[in-house]
C-alpha cells in the first residue's frame, strides 16, 4: 500500500512541475508573440496585388531566398503554411499569408492587402468566415428559387 502512495505522490509532483513549466513557457511565448505583433503593426503598408495562386505548402518549397530561409524556425519549416503567389507591380512574388486572410483571398483578382515584408497581415473589405458562409447560403437559396421559377416559366411553353 505504501508503494502505491509513493508512486502517486511522485506522479502528482511531476504533474505540478509540468504545469508550472508550461505556465512560464506560455507566458514567455505570449510576450514574444506580442512583440512580433507590434513589429508587424509598425511595418505594415497597404498595397494592391493581383493574386495568381494560393496553396498550403511548406515554406522550404516556396522558393524564398537563402537569407530568408535561414531565419525561419525549424518547426515552421516542417509545418504547412498558407502561401500566396501574387503580382505586386511588375514583380511576381510568393508571400506568406495569415490563415484568416487566406480563406477570404480571391484567386485571379486584384485586391488591396496589408503587407508587412513578405507577410500578408490583412485585406481591405475582408469578410469573416460566418459572413462568407451566409453569402454562400443566400446564393444557393437565390439559385434554387431562380431555378424553380424558370422551370415554372418554361413549363408553360412545353407541350
Image: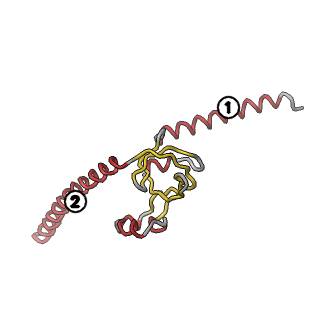
Q: Which callout, 2 or 1, points at the residue further toward the start of the chain?
A: 2
Q: For the residue carrying disc 2, how many other residues have a C-alpha within 10 Å: few (<14), some (14-19), or many (20+)?
A: few
Residue placed farthest to the right in the image?
Answer: 159
Mark 1 Cα-neighbour bin, 10 Å: few <14, some 14–19, many ≥20: few
**Helix, strand or loop under label 1:** helix
Q: Nearer the viewer, residue 94 or 106?
A: 94
114 and 23: which is toward the camera:
114
Q: Is residue 148 left or right of residue 123?
A: right
Residue marked by disc 2: 25
Report x, y in % for residue 78. 41, 67
Question: Are the residues at dot 2 and dot 1 in contact (C-beta closer than 8 Å)?
Answer: no
127 vs 26: above or below: above
- Image coordinates of residue 115 in percent, x first then y, are 43, 50
Determine the residue positioned at 9% across, 70% down. 2
User: SS class of the residue under badge 2?
Assistant: helix
Q: Residue 14 in the image: state x and y as whole percent.
A: 17, 65
Residue at 49% x, 65% y: name it: 62
Q: Is residue 72 left or right of residue 25?
A: right
Residue nearest the observer in this picture, 62 or 134 = 62
Query: Which residue sits furthest left?
Result: 2
How far apart are the two marked residues, 2 and 1, measured between alpha carbons?
55 Å
40 vs 97, nearest the viewer? 40
Foreground tag (2 vs 1): 2
| Residue under the image location 54 percent in, 58 percent down | 92
* Residue annotated with mark 1: 145
- What is the quadrant of the N terminus in the image? bottom left
Left or right side of 77 for 13? left
Q: Quadrant of residue 6?
A: bottom left
Amino acid at each position: 500500500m505504501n508503494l502505491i502512495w509513493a508512486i502517486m505522490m511522485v506522479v502528482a509532483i511531476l504533474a505540478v512541475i509540468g504545469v508550472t513549466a508550461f505556465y512560464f513557457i506560455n507566458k514567455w511565448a505570449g510576450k514574444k508573440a506580442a512583440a512580433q505583433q507590434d513589429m508587424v503593426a509598425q511595418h505594415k503598408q497597404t498595397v494592391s496585388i493581383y493574386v495568381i495562386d494560393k496553396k498550403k505548402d511548406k515554406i522550404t518549397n516556396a522558393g524564398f531566398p537563402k537569407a530568408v530561409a535561414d531565419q525561419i524556425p525549424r518547426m515552421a519549416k516542417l509545418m504547412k503554411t498558407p502561401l500566396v503567389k501574387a503580382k505586386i507591380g511588375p514583380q511576381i512574388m510568393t508571400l506568406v499569408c495569415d490563415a484568416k486572410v487566406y480563406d477570404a483571398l480571391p484567386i485571379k483578382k486584384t485586391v488591396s492587402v496589408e503587407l508587412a515584408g513578405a507577410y500578408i497581415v490583412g485585406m481591405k473589405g475582408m469578410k469573416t468566415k460566418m459572413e462568407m458562409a451566409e453569402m454562400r447560403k443566400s446564393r444557393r437559396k437565390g439559385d434554387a428559387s431562380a431555378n424553380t421559377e424558370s422551370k415554372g416559366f418554361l413549363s408553360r411553353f412545353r407541350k
